Image (cartoon, rainbow, N blue to C red):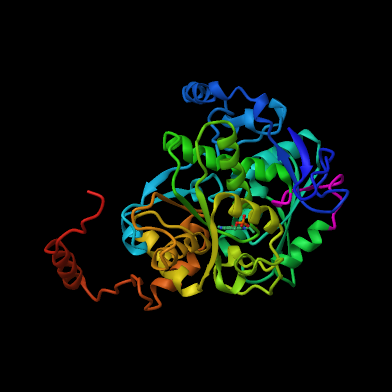
């Protein structure tokens, strides 16, 4: 695989983070001619019965399509084999006949970051890195801390001192990382990280091209689980825009290898108070950073690092970008929970965005749609508890019972009511 600048195509040296010529982000380039595409499906099927730890990972199972990492350096927590779920209530809420969730929150540290982190930290270990650093709204830090702990690498995270989920910080502390809380937002933290010398410390934000390579495998996992049938639309939340870049790249590579015959369209959804990418897409002009404001704290990002890469993927797929407000995200999140699934607030931007795209006529009721859920419901329990106590549209408040008679009466009343008709 060749590492090149994603903007000017200059070839870069392995280990670099930015193009030496123009300063833009780097990307690995897969040469389809060097892959035995005809045998990939058979190889993947054979790996299902293998106990090699790489074959049990939904990332390393696709190692022929990843930059090479020595066997001994690989740090895996069996990430990436993500479930697809039918979304009954979600489909009705969005106004479509059928909807599927790809749940990336079912990863070892409960977010999609693990798919990229296993590759970035394995590469850091292969390079004998002693310290790994990231800026984070919480999920990258939890993921990096876990993989670094297992690799024997010091983990240092830069997080905003306020406004990120306590659960994510708790995970990060538990895995032993040094947490540096700054007076500033994610964008300030990432700006500081970008000043570090990548030859001294491993920078594992999604500006690191190894992260993107790991995350692209979610596209392969999704397609494989659908027997390589291509959905019409993939709807996903957008913050720093690494995941959009990664999924777009994965689908393009699957097409180049002949595993699929067309690309799904990407719909990227931002929170209205953190929507510089939606604005840039609509205006056709360069992204103007904003000071981000949203209760979906994972995507509270005003200067997304990967916007140019992501824009190319959205255009290549014939996709779109939109913004939804925080109340729409909050209700959509509860709808996802009501199907017995659940996700964190930022993830629910996908369902809220889908609903808006169906209402606006961009996505047809009969389309084949996959909404990506990026993080687990337990990532932000304070938000969930607050929602259900709030009197919001989908709130399900705790019922306080006075005595045993009331308790029995309430259970009896439910026993006499029709059961909800879902997914039967
Ligand atoms: N969903 C969740 C749950 C996230 O944690 C993030 C980003 C996104 C969506 C957006 O993905 O940045 O690839 O567009 N979280 C980062 C973090 C910024 O630090 O955990 P993106």
Quarter of the figure with residue 170:
bottom right
Viewport quadrant of the N terminus = top right
Find residue 68 and report its horizontal and vertical position in percent.
71, 30
Q: Is residue 384 left or right of residue 312?
A: left
Q: Quadrant of residue 71?
A: top right
Q: Which residues are magenta?
A: 195-207
Image position of 392 (left or right of 283): left
Say whether residue 70 is left or right of residue 377.
Answer: right
From where the camera sits, is residue 173 visible? no
Placement of 34 over or under 229, stated as above or below: above
Q: Which quarter of the picture shows residue 70?
A: top right
Number of marks present in the image shown: 0
Give how far across and how far down residue 209 sits, in percent: 72, 44
x and y percentages locating residue 342 in the rendered image: 42, 57
- Asked whether 2 or 373 is in front, the reply is 2
The answer to whether residue 206 is magenta is: yes
Residue 205 counted in the magenta span: yes
Q: Nearer the viewer, residue 256 or 3?
A: 256
Res 214 visible? yes
Q: Of helix, strand and loop, which mostly describes the magenta segment?
A: loop
Name, please, the residue furthest toward the left. 416
Front position in the image: 414 or 111: 111
Which one is nearer the viewer's eye here, 80 or 17? Answer: 17
């Amino acid at each position: 695989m060749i590492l090149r600048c994603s903007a000017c195509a200059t070839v870069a040296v392995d280990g670099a983070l930015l193009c030496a010529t123009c300063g833009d982000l780097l990307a690995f380039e897969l040469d389809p001619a060097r892959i035995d595409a005809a045998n990939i499906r058979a190889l993947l099927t054979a790996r299902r019965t293998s106990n090699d730890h790489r074959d049990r990972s939904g990332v390393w199972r696709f190692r022929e399509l990843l930059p090479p990492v020595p066997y001994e350096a690989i740090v895996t927590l069996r990430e990436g084999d993500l479930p697809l779920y039918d979304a009954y209530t979600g489909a009705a809420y969005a106004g479509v006949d059928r909807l599927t969730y790809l749940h990336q929150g079912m990863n070892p540290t409960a977010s999609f970051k693990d798919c990229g982190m296993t590759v970035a930290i394995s590469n850091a270990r292969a390079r004998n890195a002693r310290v790994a650093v990231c800026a984070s709204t919480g999920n990258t830090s939890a993921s990096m801390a876990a993989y670094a702990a297992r690799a024997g690498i010091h983990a240092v995270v830069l997080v905003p001192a306020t406004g990120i989920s306590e659960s994510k910080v708790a995970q990060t502390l538990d895995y032993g990382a040094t947490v540096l809380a700054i007076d500033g937002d994610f964008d300030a933290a990432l700006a500081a990280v970008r000043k570090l010398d990548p030859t001294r410390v491993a920078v594992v934000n999604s500006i690191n091209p190894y992260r993107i390579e790991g995350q692209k495998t979610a596209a392969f996992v999704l397609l494989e689980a659908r027997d390589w049938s291509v959905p019409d639309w993939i709807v996903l939340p957008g913050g720093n825009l690494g995941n959009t870049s990664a999924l777009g790249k994965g689908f393009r590579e699957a097409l180049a290898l002949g595993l699929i015959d067309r690309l799904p369209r990407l719909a990227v959804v931002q929170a209205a108070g953190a929507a510089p990418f939606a604005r840039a897409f609509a205006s056709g002009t360069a992204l103007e950073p904003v000071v981000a404001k949203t209760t979906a704290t994972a995507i509270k990002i005003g200067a997304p690092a990967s916007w140019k890469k992501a824009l190319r993927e959205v255009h290549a797929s014939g996709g779109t970008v939109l913004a939804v407000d925080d109340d729409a995200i909050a209700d959509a999140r509860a709808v996802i929970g009501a199907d017995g699934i659940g996700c964190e607030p930022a993830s629910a931007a996908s369902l809220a965005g889908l609903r808006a795209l169906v209402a606006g006529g961009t996505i047809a009721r009969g389309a084949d749609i996959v909404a990506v859920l990026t993080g687990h419901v337990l990532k932000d329990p304070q938000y969930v508890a607050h929602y259900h106590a709030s009197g919001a549209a989908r709130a399900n408040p705790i019922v306080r019972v006075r005595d045993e008679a009331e308790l029995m009466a309430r259970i009896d009343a439910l026993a006499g009511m029709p059961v909800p008709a879902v997914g039967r």
